[in-house]
Image: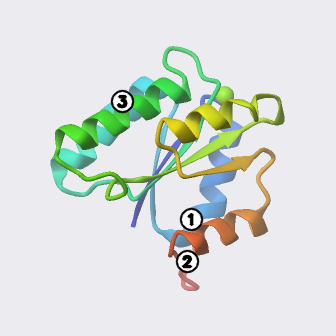
Amino acid sequence: MRMLIVDDDEINRKLLQALVKPFGQIDLAENGLEAVARFNGAQELGEPYEVVFLDIMMPQMNGHDCLQKIRGIELDRGLAKGDGAKVVMVTALGDARNVMSAFSAGAEYYLVKPIQQRKLFELMAEMGFQPNPMT
Ligand SMILES: [Mg+2]
């Protein structure tokens, strides 16, 4: 299972990476532009990301614009709504209101920073993913 973590803050990226490691293979992106490039590349390889963790506040391309691009790529590839990646908006408390517009743009879930392992694991289970105890 492939996942993409998108956050401009290195500590946030590393923290989330450590938490979701038991669920599969992880790629990291520092901003929306890099995320879109990676997302596109994974689609072209035929190994698409199943989960994308997306920070909202980022320079160059924010999480909202990135989400729109991601859904656009899926649409271009003929993926039906709901058949694409699960997108989890990762938000600071201050931008929690932003989450609402993210849902209308096609995000499925959100997590509030700092991320709690229990919440994250509940969310992964809700998406149908279980941690691999061997990792
Ligand atoms: Mg940020």
In the rendered view of the protein, which quadrant contains the N terminus? bottom left
Q: Which residue is mark 3?
A: 69
52 relative to 9 in the view: left or right: left
Q: Which mark sits nearer the N-terminus, 2 or 1?
A: 1
Q: Which mark sits nearer the N-terminus, 2 or 3?
A: 3
Foreground label between 2 and 3: 3
Residue type of the residue flagged with mark 1 = Lys
Identity of the residue drawn at 51% across and 74% down: 129
Query: Of helix, strand and loop, which one carries label 1?
Result: helix
Q: Is residue 48 above or below residue 90?
A: below
Residue type of the residue flagged with mark 3 = Lys
C-beta proximity under 8 Å, tags 2 and 1:
yes
- Disc 1: CA contacts within 10 A as few (<14), some (14-19) or many (>=20): some
Identity of the residue drawn at 41% across and 34% down: 35
Q: Which mark sits nearer the N-terminus, 1 or 3?
A: 1
Q: Which residue is mark 1?
A: 21
Q: Which disc number belongs to residue 135?
A: 2
